[in-house]
Every structure is written in structure tokens, then in C-alpha cells.
Image (cartoon, helix red, strand yellow):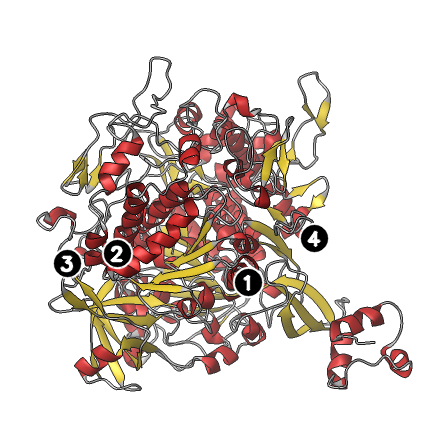
Amino acid sequence: MNVSRRGFFKVCAAGMTGSSLATMGFAPSAALAEVRQYKLAHATETRSICPYCSVSCGTLVYSMGDKSKNAKARIFHIEGDPDNPVNRGSLCPKGAGLLDMVHSPQRLTHPEVREPGSNEWKRISWDEAFDRIAGHLKADRDANFIERNEAGLTVNRWNTTGFLASSAASNEPGYLMHKVMRGLGAVAFDTQARI
Amino acid sequence: MTNHWVDIKNADLVLIMGGNAAEAHICGFKWVQEAKHGRKARLVVVDPRFTRSAAVSDYYAPIRAGSDIAFLSGVIHYLLENDKIQHEYVKTHTNASFLIDPAYGFENGLFTGYDAEKRGYDKSTWRYQMGEDGYAKVDPTLQDPNCVFQLMKRHFARYDADTVSRITGTPKDAFLKVCGMIAECSAPNRTMTILYALGWTQHSVGSQNIRSMAMIQLLLGNMGMAGGGINALRGHANVQGITDQCLFGESLPGYLHEPTEAEPTLEVFLDKRTPRMLRPGQMNYWSNYPKFFISLLKAFYGPSATPDNSFGYDWLPKMDGAYDVLAMFERMHQGRMNGFVCQGFNPLASVANKGKVSAALAKLKYLVVIDPLATDTSEFWKDYGELNKADPAQIQTEVFRLPAALFAEHEGSFTNSSRVIQWHWKAADGPGETREDTEIFGQLFVRLRAMYARDGGAFPEPIQKLHWPYRIASHPSSQELAREISGYAISDLTDASGNVTVKAGEQVAGFAVLRADGSTACGNWLYSGMWSQAGNLTARRDNSDPTGLGQSLNWGFAWPANRRILYNRASCDASGKPWDPERNVIHWNGKAWGGNDVPDMRPNATPDEGVGAFIMTGEGVARLFAPGMVEGPFPEHYEPFETPLGRNPMHPDVPAVVSNPAARVYQGDMELFGKADEFPYVATTYRLAEHFHFWSKTSKINAILQPEHFVEISEELAAEKGIRKGDVVTVRSNRGHIKAVAVVTKRIPVLTVEGRKVHTVGIPLHYGFKGETKPGYITNTLTPFVGDANTQTPEYKAFLVDIEKA
């Protein structure tokens, strides 16, 4: 019996333990590292999509922790999703490096502000960030909102604060952003998709 | 893509031009290999660089960056001259037989109606002759001198092989060889697919590059066919989806229009935006515009949108001009903007002319950066020496930086280049205090709403009336939003006999049931059906492909209506028989349309009814003559705004038409265009297999794979300039300079254009002063601040530089 790594896990998942399979003489090929088996067998597998190019390859994201309320999940491995009809399990040199982006030292971890004229970042709370930003948005909107144009036509337009939307955002935040911006009367916005 | 990634395997000929799938869309490129192995397909690559796509091609032809229209117009001429077109297809499915206003003309590089002052056209002569019955006139024999087919023949007759070779630098024999291979696909059962990307869009004539190819695909009869189509290989994993949600100032979700000042009322707006039928019996699907638009207003304003207040039409802002990214930075540069909110986007690095962008940001009162990663933009104010000179004390912009979740840290849907919407699940929380974008925008909105309720302010009504039914107001969930995008019934929907077909509160099955009376809400009609009563169809994971055509109809959900190949009615002749029975997409079975895809046709429209395959047009056919384009109904070669020739070889004596006469150029930017005497080399930016835009430079492994900024030049240019492999060189345009390591290769051909040598400098764009890669200059320091006349996509792919050893 020739069992591939993936096949091996499928068999395991069917209700037998790896060790009992091994004792029955159905151990997978010798090159398989025991440590790695253990790690993946206890991992939570989540279906996701590589955020880089528009092939949008299916990925399997492995994390430690079982998503219970008191366990903090940590992603430790990402690979191509073999079920995805487009990438069929493969990832390119960009996608193969996803784990390093997830854990990049360049990740932002808290809100911060650079005050006018300052040369440094200052850590602030989310509450402060939201309140200050909302204050700026309101002050600018109130000062520059155009309710009617010169001809007296209702135009309800706010064009002194601009927005740039990300093509890496999902459809749902994209739609929400559009709805909020129109609610505020915003016209000055664009997205990466143009470029 | 009109077709999809897996469908590439069905092609007989794969043309890669204006893209480099082997390096930029690597896992999609496997389907090119599949076509080569499975169908003995051939791969042809036309590119200024001998890319890795070229390295595995059957044939490679070099071309000067920015001369694609000359090349493609030459192909059109070749097909017409040698009668290599799919005649029945052209007659059935295109507007070749339509008669054009005799006043329409083309002279000295300009179409009729040009206004030099406005840099634009009065398009009133670019129109069909209308009959007394109110429909466009046609000549099915294609003989009338004013029919589109004859006009086309005359227009493209000027692009003979010698002319093409003289402009493009493509050797004549190479050009003719490519023409011959393309021409073979005029056989009804042979298809060519075209894979293009930013190499076509990022030009001042970008839209016409693509349109030229669309005309070729129509002449060959390849639209709607398996293994055919026009396939844009797009950027990010959800760039298609964000395009469809239309985060453009001028649009609303689903390619609806944001009203302008010229449309004061809902009635005027709908009347103007709902197209008329131009030939009898057509579907003219945009005639449903009012249903889509009013359903969107109901999604936006909920119960507050009523027939009495025109469903909240007045609350929508009315546009007064352009607000694309170049226009916004221009306004900012003029000091006309105070704030800027920048989500997951690094404009300092990715927008043209970094110097101008940086100066514009410094004029803002506040900048908000929402990103998972520390971007160059967020630190535009910080001094990084020669890489980013800045004096923070002088810059009064208040900058906020908010940590956002990455792809694996929230759930939601991405739409791939194939238009397939796929759900992704959350694997873990982001690091530290990271929050999801839905919460960041939710929080900002509910706080603003509360502030307006408490303190009042400018026109608070649309803010208070915005429909906000989310369970946690400060954090709408992706599931709630997906259901709203897909659409639901507000009251019971009944059929003609009064039977309830959809109950109030139920999800709609698709856009066909949307109503214009306020009884349905739908955030994006194109996505309608993605979350029906059957649940979240974007989460479907059945990858079975029973016919082997590669459609996988039960994997995710494709827009529109889960259709995988657009215009698939055109894969059949007038009687409904497939042009190629071996690759049957759909066919007429005597009672209905069906087969291996969702038909792009009313299912019960008998072939005798003559309902055209291009259901979104009023004429029911595809447009070889396209009056919607800004710079002309036919493509014409114009030089890039920075041209090595200094004139347009098609019109050498007409200075007005050197470059796209209808492209928008701002004062100050025109003066910054470089001339060939000072900047003699053609530069083109490109991407590497190991990096994605300015994103993967934050990832250690990718930084190790491609650690440092470089520029690529030919051995000949290197010898001429005394540059050796590994030298640091300075590359200069009229807007600034960068320094990088010289990579001297055989991959950059030296071309002969109009009798003189043209050298190309290739510049990868992934580097900057932030990241895990070696700190570098930003490539877009060099690029010109001008965009395509139709889309305003900047001209990154063809501009002028000088290069010297640093």
C-alpha cells in the first residue's frame, strides 16, 4: 500500500490513529518526517485565498489552536489548496512567501499618530484614533460641503477629503466603504484597480 | 477576463502581449502549458523584453514599448487584406454591416469633431444612420462605402507590414510570421486567446490597445468561444471585485453611474442612462437599468428611500468633474484638498511622479493610512536621505496609521480575474491591536453619525438615513454585507397571476427578479445571486468538471449569474449550432439554450427571433466601430507622451497628433515631459516573479530572493555607456532620478525604428525605503503624470530616460 502524505491524513481522519496504522504495516514512505506529521495533525486548517495576484490561488492556512474562545490561534504554515480548480495546490514564489508577510516585522500592531511637524510616531488608543479622525472628517465636511451649486441645484457634494480604496480588501468592506462614502457625500475617491 | 483561467487550456494559439503571465501570474500560466500539452497549442509572445513567458514560447517577436496599436492595426490590415476573417461570425455577431453617418471622417490623424482647445471630440458624427423605423440602418452585403466594414478596410489600409515594422521596430518577417499564426484562427473551429495585463493598460492609449485586440478577436470569431475571448490578467486577488464594487468617484456598484450635475432628477437620470434599442427584437439588457439603480438606492437608504423622495436620489452627491487618482493628486497639489484616507494602498510608490505626490501629501491637513504593513506613503514626511528627502519640521500634515487585518485574518469574498467570487475564512486574529476594515469603517461611521445627531452640521440627513441594519453597528459582518450585496425582497414579489414568487425578507435568486418599484434591495446587481436562499454560493467547493471543458460551474459563484464565458451565445452560428462541436459551450437544443455554461441569452429565445449575442448593447452585436471611445471609434497609432521619435510616423507633419490628442494633461506636467535629445532611451517598468507590487518587499523570504533594486539594459547599450554588470547606475527622467544596480542581459533587444537604433531600459518597480529588502529608490520617481484618455491609468510603460554610471 503506497500512501501519500495527504492520503495518509485522510485515512487517519477516517477514525484510526496514525500509530495504529503504522503498526498494521501501512506506514507512509520512509522520508516522511514524524515531527511534521504531529504538527499538522494538531493544526486547524482554514481555507483562504492568496491576496497577491488575480489568479487568487486557493490556500490552506494552518494555525495552532482550535479556535476555542480561550485559545489564541497562530498561523504557522500556508500552502496551496489542492482542491482549487485553478491552482490545484501550487503556489508561486510570491505566494510561497505568504507566511513571512503574515509575520513580517513590518506589520503594524497599534494605532499611532505623527503630529504636525513631528519626527516620530506616537502610540494612541483606537478610541482616540477614531475620535480624532472622525473629528477631522466632520470638520472638513462641515466647512466644505456643497449643498447647492451656483445654479441652485442640489448637489450634496464633499470633495475636499479624498479616499483611496484597496484592491486587496474583500468585496464586503469594499461595498461598505462605498456606501459610507456616498452617505457622507464623498465624490473624491478611487482605487488601485485604476492603476 | 471574458473567459477564465482554466479555459486557457482550450486555446489553439495563446498570444501574450502587454503582459508576462509566466512571471506575473505564475499559477495561471500553468493553463498555457496545459494548452500546449493537451491541444498542441502554440504560444506567441510579443514584448519589448525577452521575458520568461517568451523563454517558453514557440515564437517571440520584439516590439518597441508604446507602439502596440501600430502592430495590432497591422494585424487587422493583414486579416482583411488576406481575407482571413470568420465571415459568418462577422456578419452575425458584429456591427460590420451598420451604416455610419456620411459626415464621419478621419484626416491627418484626427477624427471629425476635434476641438484642440478642449483636447477632446464632439462625437456627433460618430453615429449610425437611422432609418424611419427608428432603428440603425444596415447593409448585409457589406458593400456600402459607409458601412463599418468598408470604413474599417480604408482606415487600416495604411498599416502595411513595412509601415508597422518601421514604427514598432519588429522585424518585418517576425511581424508577418505572427500575423500568419493569428490568421489561422479565423477557421471557425480554431481559437486564439489573448492574455494581457498592465503592459497594455498603462499607456496614454491603453484602452485602444485592448480595443484593437477586441476587433481582431471579433474578426477571427473568437469572442464567446471556449479557448478564446479577451483576457485581462488583473492585479490583486480582489482587484476585479473592487472594480465591480466600483470604488470610483464616477460610478456606483455594478457599473451604474454616479449622477452628475446634468442629471438633477431621478427621471432625467434614468432616461439618460437607460439605453434605447438600436435594432429590432434585441434584449438590450441595460434596459433594466432602473431596476438595478432603485434596488441599489433601497440597499443604501432602506425604508427612508420612498417613491415620494425619488428613493433618496437627492442624497446622492452629483459629480462636477474628474476625481480619479491623478486628478485627486493634482487637486491636492493645488492645495484644494484637506484630508486623505488611504486604505491598503501605497500611492507614494505606485502613483506617477513621486515628487509631485510627496509635495501634494505635504499640503494636507490630515492623512489616514489604514494598512496591515508600514508603507512608504505613511512615512512620506520622514527623511530617508537621498531615497526620500524630507524635512519633517516643515511638514504640517497630521498622519494617522491604523493597523488592519490581512487576508487570513478576516472572512469575506475575493473575485478572481475569471470573475469567480470565492469565500475565504478567518484563520487567526492579526497581531497586537489589529482590526478588520469593516470595523474601522463601521466605527468611523457610527461615531460620525452620533456626532451629527448631537452637534448637527452640514446636511446631516443622508448620514442619518443611511440604512444601517447591522447586528453590531460598529462592526458590520462580511456575511451581512454579502447578503445585502446579493439582494433581498422587501415585500412579497408576485408573478403576473398574483402568486408569491419571493417572500418578503428572502434573498433573491438573481438580478432577473429585481424591481424598480422599491420592493427589492440589492447592493450590486452584478453580484446578485451570490447569496441566495440556498445560502452563500461563493463558498461552494465542488470542483467537478463533468465535460472536461474546465468550467467547474459549482465552484464559487461567477458574475453575472454564474456564467463562466461571457458572450457565449456567439460560440454558435445564427441557427444555434456551435462553431466547434468539440468545444461546446452552449447550443440551441430545439427548445432552449443550454450546455456547459449558463447561456448569455434569454433561454427560450429561438434562433429565428434573431436576438443578438451581445445582449448588453442596444444593437445586439459587438462594435467594430465604437463611438463610446474618447479618442476615436477606430484605434489609431499615437506615440507615448515621451517619444524617442519626436513625431508620429503615421502623421509626420502634424504636431497636434504626435501623442493621444484626447488625453488629459495638466498644466505643469506637460512641461515636464522629456525630449529624446536629453533623454534618449525608452524606459518601461515591470514586475518580478518573486515580488508583488510594493507588498512582498515586507516579506523576508521574498526580500532574500530579490533583495535589491536593479535596472536591466542590453549588452550593446552597456558597452556604449561603459557600464558593467553590477555597477551602480543613475537613471534620470525629466522628473527625477533613481540609482540601482545594472543588470546587463541579452533579454532586452535593440530595435531599429525609423532607421535609427532604439534602446530600452527595463526597470522593476518593487523597491522603496521601507521593507525587508535593501532600502532603494522608488521607481515612480521617474514616470510621467499622464493617463489613458478613457481610464486615466498612468503611462508607466513607455517614457524617456538617460542612464549613466553613478
Which is more foreground, mark 3 or mark 4? 4
Badge 4: residue crowd in 10 Å (few <14, some 14–19, many ≥20)? some
- Decide which of tag 4 and tag 2 comes sooner along the chain: 2
Q: Which residue is mark 2?
A: B67
Give the amino acid type for the residue marked by disc 3 in the picture: Glu
- Marks 2 and 3 on same chain: yes
Secondary element type, mark 2: loop
Which subunit holds the residue at mark 1? B
Q: Which residue is mark 3?
A: B671
Question: Is the C-beta separation of discs 1 and 2 under 8 Å?
Answer: no
- Decide which of tag 1 and tag 2 comes sooner along the chain: 1
Give the amino acid type for the residue marked by disc 1 in the picture: His
- Decide which of tag 3 and tag 4 comes sooner along the chain: 4
Give the amino acid type for the residue marked by disc 4 in the picture: Ser
Secondary element type, mark 4: loop
Structural distance between the alpha carbons of marks 2 and 3: 23 Å
* Mark number displayed over residue B544: 4
